[in-house]
Structures are given as structure tokens and as C-alpha cells.
Image: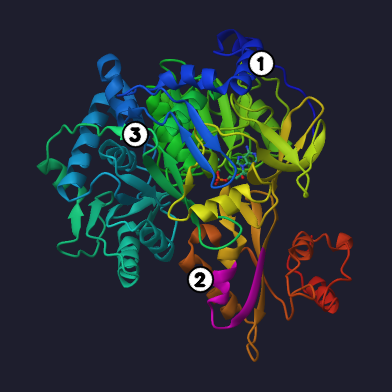
Amino acid sequence: MSAKLHPVPEDAKRRALVDNETYLAWYERSVMDPEGFWREHGQRIDWFTPFTKVKNATFSGDVSIRWFEDGTTNAAYNCIDRHLEKRGDQAAIIFEGDEPDTARTITYRALHEEVCRLANVMKARGVAKGDRVTIYMPMVPEAAYAMLACARIGAVHSVVFGGFSPEALAGRIVDAQSTFVVTADEGVRGGKTIPLKANADKACDIAGRDGVTVETLLTLKRTGGDVAWKEGRDVWYRDETEKVEADCPAEEMSAEDPLFILYTSGSTGKPKGVLHTTGGYMVWTSITHQYVFDYHEGDIYWCAADVGWVTGHSYIVYGPLANGATTVMFEGVPTYPDASRLWQTVDKHQINIVYTAPTAIRALMGAGNEYVSKTSRSSLRVLGSVGEPINPEAWEWYHTVVGEGRCPIVDTWWQTETGGIMITPLPGATDLKPGSATRPFFGVQPQLVDAEGAVLEGEADGNLCITDSWPGQMRTVYGDHDRFIKTYFSAYPGKYFSGDGCRRDTDGYYWITGRVDDVINVSGHRMGTAEVESALVAHEAVSEAAVVGYPHAVKGQGIYCYVTLMGGREWSEDLRKQLVAQVRNEIGGIATPDKIQVAPGLPKTRSGKIMRRILRKIAEDDYGSLGDTSTLADPGVVDDLIANRQNRK
Ligand code: PRX
């Protein structure tokens, strides 16, 4: 790992909200006196009833996490209403459409009206406080309106990424028992259309068979493409919003009332509904957004994620809007019409802060420097990275070519579960090392432990835990608190276990090394290998499947599948296509297998456990270091797997 140090540029230091001394002092206070620290910083959002209690959390026993619990507030009020007086005419959202000539600006005043109208539509159609609303939308402002409309009336949103299949959408509708769904006729990305309404129709059918009847499918007309229509259930977004009042009061919510559910993949089983609540989440997203991006009044800020992921929730919608920022929403992809798109968009809107994923950076790096150098980028001040480890080469390119050496890079480590950024540099405070997420944010207490749970001090390599609660932390798995306890607090009792491996260097900097569980990270999208396996074995030709990740130059990790066929079934190109289609149908395009290898046998211990370590090594083409294979029931299967491996260098 490169240890080249990039000191904080003088310019960044001069204008920063937090310098290194302030960081050190605040951090110390945040962990020595969390009550005092958060009592003060909890005031950054508006409360209807001020809180008197700050923190009430235990990671032991039943695990209970409560912040600001006797305060009342509303997330949409904090993102919209409180800004109206001072910045009603300021842009809240700049929408940059898929085609470069389609941009729209939504002021805070317009945002207020849009959100109120949609909230009134929801209410008129029976959505009440605590009800779950599923949002399956393209990256258009209406997706944000839908989230904020839910927040306004106290409904709990569950946003499902538009790339998920009808099956995956249905599973989430059913788990959340959601009877109100918001979608669009079609999405548009990189010049291609995505049949969202058709997918939602199928998902509603599947959900219906599984006992959940969607009563309203509110559909935004995005392209005007042909869609099927079910009278009584399907209604057009704009028809409905025109019928209702342009004002809707913000519901008074307790700090611990749920704000949203977001499904994410784990090592085992179906995706989990990560539940976030209101007060702590708003404090966490707004404070991290301000200090991590060194956000100043008037800055134009762009997080190029999708609202279907937590990054979009926390850093396109809630964090920036709580801070009264101008947030850019981008419908397209970084390579359309060509690899200049991000930087042309920066120039067009004079964007100061860009936050994107290493996979995009690597893809653009591969396209060539001329796509960058022909743009100005003079407005850029801070660059961010999120979602997966950034390799030092990509970091250097981002820093030198995109940022011309003057923009600090914030490599932010966090998770759906953490609600917001946890380990990160601060632009004016932290000397950078390419590939390191550097130091913990205020209130975050990381700890490295070995496999047995022994705490590792100083320079060490281990499993990353967090020892105490922070306001933005998830509160439970929706409908399954036991799973919450088991997943995050049982490996190392009394600690939150992230599932990530991590190294701490002699300067106390943290280097995330990737997942240590059976979760893979493909283009920054998190996926459980078990989900892909269960999709594969659902095919009648497959008797057993094992899926692992392998290094991929652009995606970070690719999906490598080993399948054992049913007796009598022959491998063929047609079968390979069927299996790929099967996974895409069950999960979505993001889970498309990169490699499929037929495995007459899988390496198993005598007790029948698949030894994934060996499968990973073979997928990496690193079969020289398989380690001990003597405990295998049949060591001979390994030779066969090596002889037929798909990933030869
Ligand atoms: O493995 C870590 C990786 O992404 C996982 C969380 O994925 P998800 O919940 O989908 O959230 C992604 C956006 C926050 C983590 O467990 N990860 C995220 N950020 C980084 C990272 N790995 C290394 N460096 C990062 N900056």
C-alpha cells in the first residue's frame, strides 16, 4: 500500500471549516463527552419539541439504540420549510437529465410545493403515518419529492434501485407490506430506456400472489412510452398532484420514529430492511455533509450516486438539503454521450464538490485524459470517493488529472447500516494517503479485532468494529430485530461489526481492505453471494452453486460462479445464457455473472461446508497458494477446478 503523503493544500486549509487542531479537539470531546458534544451539535436541525435526553444506547443484550429520544421534529421540514424564508428562491435541486441539453432547476419554494402536493396525494389515497411506501424511480427530482413527501406525513419510504428486477422489487414490497408504490413509465440512462412501469406491474402481480395487494401505483410520465394500465390501481402522478392543495403540514415525528427502510445484502438469506429513524439520522447526515465536504453557503454540490442506494439518500437528499445546499441530481451515466460528461456538467453548473465511486473513476481513467483536459473544472474544490476501496492509481488520477492537484480527496468509508460517513479525511484538516480512508469522524470509535475478538492495538490488520453508538446508526432490521442482533452484534459481543477488514498504520490511519464475509462489491454495488447462488440453483439444471468475487479492473470485483449440474445435464452455451438470464431475472442486471464454471464437485470439508477460500483463490487465478486442502472430503476436486478455471491470466 502506497504511503505517499499529500499534505493539506494551503488554499484548502485557509478556507476550511475545520483545521487539524479543531479536528483533534472536537474528536477528543466527541468520544470523551458524547453527551455534551451531541447535545450541542444536535441543535443543528430544528426541533418542534427540543430533546432533553441525548444518548441511550446499548450494544449488548437486546441491543437498543436511541438518540434525542424525547425530541420531536420532521425530516422534510428540516430539508425544506426551515430554508424558505432565507432561500426560497435558491436552487435546492439542479436536475441534469440523461441528454446533455436537459437541465432543470428546482428552488426551495418549488420543492416545497411539489413535496406538499405529493404528500397530499398520498394522504388522499389513504397513506398514513407509519405506512410503508415503495419508490421505484429513475433519477429524477420526483424521486426526491416522493421521499420527502413520505417524510412529511410520517410514512416510511423504501426506495428500490431502478436496476432491480420485478422479482427483487416484489420481495421488497412484500417484506415492507407496502400498498402504495411510486414509479415512472420508463427510466432513461445512457440513451437506453428501462421499463420501470412494466417491471412494477409484474412486481405487483407477484406481490399479490404473496399476499400484498398494491392499491395505488402512482406513475410519473417520464418518456411517454406505452404502458399497460390497470384501472383503479394505476394513476398518473401529474393528474393526481394537480387535484390537491399546494400546502401540507409537516407531521410532528418523534426522533425515533422510522424515516426509511433500505434493503441491503448480507452474507446470508434475503436482503435485510435496514431501518433508519428521524432525529439522529438527520443530525448525522447534515453534520457529515457539512464537514466532510467542507460545504460552504452557496456551494454547488454533486453526488453522482443513485437515490436507490444509501449514498443517494444521505448525500443527494437528506444531508445537503438539511444544510440548505444546492444538490445536483444526475439521471445519466458518466460515459454518455462520452467520457467527458461529468466534467462538462461540472463546468455547466459551476460545481464545487463532486462525490462519486471508484468504479466510475477507473472507467473514466481508462477512457483517456483528453476527455478531462478539454474541460475547465476550475470551479472544483473538493472531490469525494465512496462505495469500495479506491486503488492508489485511480486515486492519483482523480487527484492529479481531474483535480489538478488542488482538490483534497475525501475517501469516505461507511455503509447502509451506518447512515452516513464514518471514516474519512476532512478537506482542511487531514493529510492524505492515496487508498486510505484516514481517520474517524467525530463520535466514531473504530476498533480492530482478530478472529477471536482480541483487541489489536497500534499498527494492525483485523476486523473493523465500532465500539459505541453514533446518531446515524441503523436501529433494527425491519421486522426482525433478532437478525439485527445476530448480524451485527454477535460476532464480537458488545461491538458493532462492520463485516469489513481493515488495517491501521503507524499514523493511526485506517485502510479498508474489503469485506471479510460472503458479500461482494461489484461496481460499488453490494451483493450477497448467497443471493446469486439461490438464483442459480433455482434453475432446474443446477444442483449446487457457489459464488465468489474476483478482482476486476473496472468493477472492483466481478462475479464468479461455480455450478454443479444435475445428473445427465450437459453444459452448453445455451445453458450458460439461461443461467445468466436467471440471475438477472431474480435480482437484476447488476448481478450479471461475469464467469460461470461447471464444477463436477465443489471443495467441501468432511462436514459438508464449502471451502470458499479455495474457490476464491482459483477465481483469482492464484491457485499456487491454496493453503491446506487436506481437510477436504475429496481433495481431487481441486485439480479439476484448476484445470477448468475460467480466469486464466
Ligand atoms: O466494504 C465496504 C464498502 O462498501 C460497503 C458498504 O456498502 P453499502 O452498504 O452498499 O454502502 C455503500 C456506500 C456507503 C462497506 O462495508 N465501502 C464503502 N465505502 C468504502 C468501502 N470500502 C473501502 N473504502 C471506502 N471508502
Q: Is residue 380 visible?
A: no
Point out the frontmost of discs 2 and 1.
Answer: 1
Secondary structure state at the residue bearing disc 1: helix
Instruction: Report which quarter residue 105 is drawn in.
Output: top left
Mark 1 vs mark 3: which is more N-terminal? 1
Looking at the rendering, the quadrant in which ligand 1 lies is top right
Residue, disc 3: 254
Mark 2 vs mark 3: which is more N-terminal? 3
Residue, disc 2: 581
Q: Which residues are magenta?
A: 533-547
Q: How is the image coloured?
A: rainbow
Judge the density around disc 3: few (<14), some (14-19), many (≥20) Cα neighbours within 10 Å.
many
Label 1, label 3: how far apart the Cα atoms are: 33 Å
Residue at 61 percent across and 17 percent down: it is 29
Q: Among all residues in the image, which is located at the extreme top? A: 14
Residue at 24 percent across and 61 percent down: it is 226
Q: What amino acid type should be assigned to the residue bearing mark 3?
A: Ser
User: Where residue 36 sits in the image (x, y, percent)?
Assistant: 53, 17
Residue, disc 1: 24
Does the Cβ of the disc 1 residue fall within 8 Å of ligand 1?
Answer: no
Q: What amino acid type should be assigned to the residue bearing mark 2?
A: Ala
